[in-house]
Image: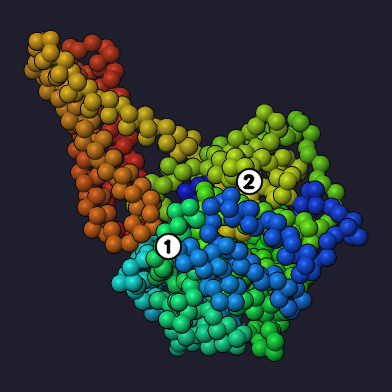
Amino acid sequence: MRPITAFLAGLLALAPALSAGAQDAPAPADAAAAPGAAAPADRTPALQRADVEAWLDGYLPYALAAGDIAGAVVVVVKDGEVLLQKGYGLADVEAGTPVDPERTLFRPGSISKLFTWTAVMQLVEAGRIDLDADVNQYLDFEMPARDGKPVTLRQVLTHTAGFEEAMRGLIFSDEDGLVTLGDTLKRWIPHRIHSPGTTPAYSNYATALAGYVVERVSGESFDDYVERHILQPLGMRDASFRQPLPPALAQRMSKGYASLSDGKAKPYEFINLAPAGSMAVTGADMAKFMIAHLQRGEYQGARILSADTAERMHRTRSEAGIGPLHRMMLGFYETSRNGHFAIAHGGDTQWFHSDVQLYPDDGVGYFISMNSAGRESATLQIRSQLAVQFARRYLPTDAAAPKPLDAAAAQAQNAAIAGAYASSRRPQDNVMGILNLLNQAKVAANEDGTISVSMWPGPAGKPKKWTPVGEWLWQDLDTGDRLAAEVVDGRVVRFSMEFVSPFMLFERLSGWRAMAPLLLGASFVALLLTVLAWPVSALVRRHYGVPYRLSGADAKAHRALRWGSLLSALGIGIGLGVVLWMMSDLENLSGADALVTVARLLVGAGLITGAALATWGAWGTLRGGRRWYAKLWALLLALAALYLLWVGFDYHLVGFGADF
């Protein structure tokens, strides 16, 4: 599964709405070129086993060591054959067991979705599913409409159904927490926060919904269906969605680690939205699946899709997106590079981090999976650089690097896009919505004529720099990745970047929303200072024998302000504390329902009572005989308490229940 850390970092993100009768359109041939990738044909290294192995041997061992990662598997395929499959590092640190691409199973996370999408397309091919029909005709529960429009499987496959992020029970290690797919989906339906078909917003819930449709239409459990119709025909005997894993596979499962230096194996991860990310597979078996898709649905005589259906799946380009950036296909997302058409999918659990890249026109693909979270953003950088450098080495372009805009035009565009944005992939109408306030994406115009996005680091760990190269178009001149903005009435309203553009974009926040983190911090500090001054002033008076000088209405107002400040600070502190505690470990997102429910009630009680007391105290102070600065401070405290009350309600910290 694509990690929630991606959301927090931004992680872990338009166009006319897709109509119910949208037609399948081919992907454009003009894929982005990577600057600096040009190479004469006679100097391009041959994509042969010896060269690939030497190149990977020079790249991965150091990359894994620098990233503090225990082990990895890499498989490269070409022209229907395995070119190279190799393990690096350890599958079990304590036992010293090396990674074996034939035997060691890894968790590919959201790459599991490709199997779910393949299953859906099999049923589309069989005429049993209509991608543009109301999904409710395949369900035994009601999926509400949004803007009068139903959810369709086309929207689900392109991540444009509009769902907010669902986090509860995402990944956990206690087998007792497993719930059937149907019960998981019915427990809580995430709100649809985007108009259907208009906005890419990655959704694990939507993918699991597609898996449930497969169950309902086929009459088989999702696990059985995938085994019978995909895994067995391809001879993938070392792959399974089942949880827990069958014993014969479990004993060959790689351990997962926070880091190599930590060396403590983590428990097996369970996922209730199983079609979105529960698979375990060897590198050797992933090669069979890659080859089947590269060969338009066929592997060694076994066909899992017709050639036409495979082409439709690979090249039907979603209309939702920004400018010339990459789009979703039907399940795959585009990652074209150097003028070579490419489709791909990444995947992450807490401990495993993977990527699969396919170049259908070149008959080439690769899969990588790592078994450790490693140093911060290390797995992301290893995968990103592997994609860039693989294409640069073996699939170069003769295209010239784009020319930057002239200084005046660049400065104007950079100033226009600067500001604060929220990811389209976000929790919004539930208790986790406060994360949107805490994790805004900031676009900054740099003095050197480039822009930076706060949540998008480069290999050095600092934000990447994007150079203006066209009208509302920027490019990372090192990797060739592009950033584009959508402009309405001369104002940038949203933007995205490759490679997140197919499934996520960033929407501009109003000035009020953009200031929310500052206002939250200032309000909390003001209330906290008042709370801290309470015992300090009492101790000082006691030390010097000075009496409390206020009396009557002024004393009552003063005490009301203090109590109001205390209750408001406690209320927001409890709410933020619980949310941050849950996000500190994905395990905390399971089994915390009672805690969340009680916390929301306490937050409501504290913020409502605190705001009432602070407002009453400020009114009494303003009417009394205290000095002007005391009246000003009282007014500021009342405004701070009222603002925190608004935050509590608007971001759903106040309420009842544990839907998130």
Asked if residue 245 is positioned above or below residue 653 in the image, the reply reads: below
Horizontal arrangement in the rendering, residue 233 relative to residue 217 (left or right): right
Which residue position is annotated with label 1? 265
Report the residue at 28% width, 20% height from top: 633
Residue 430 horizontal/vertical position (percent): 36, 54
Q: Amino acid at mark 1?
A: Ala
Report the residue at 54% width, 64% height from top: 90
Horizontal arrangement in the rendering, residue 314 relative to residue 593 (left or right): right
Q: Nearer the viewer, residue 623 or 240?
A: 240
Give the alpha-carbon distance from disc 2 to disc 1, as whole Å.
27 Å
Which residue position is annotated with label 2? 459
Tag 2 secondary structure: loop
Please tell me how many numbered marks the rendered image carries.
2
Asked if residue 461 is positioned above or below residue 199 in the image, the reply reads: above
Which quadrant would residue 247 be assigned to in this image? bottom left
Crowd class of label 2 (few under 14; some 14 to 19; many from 20; radius 10 Å):
some
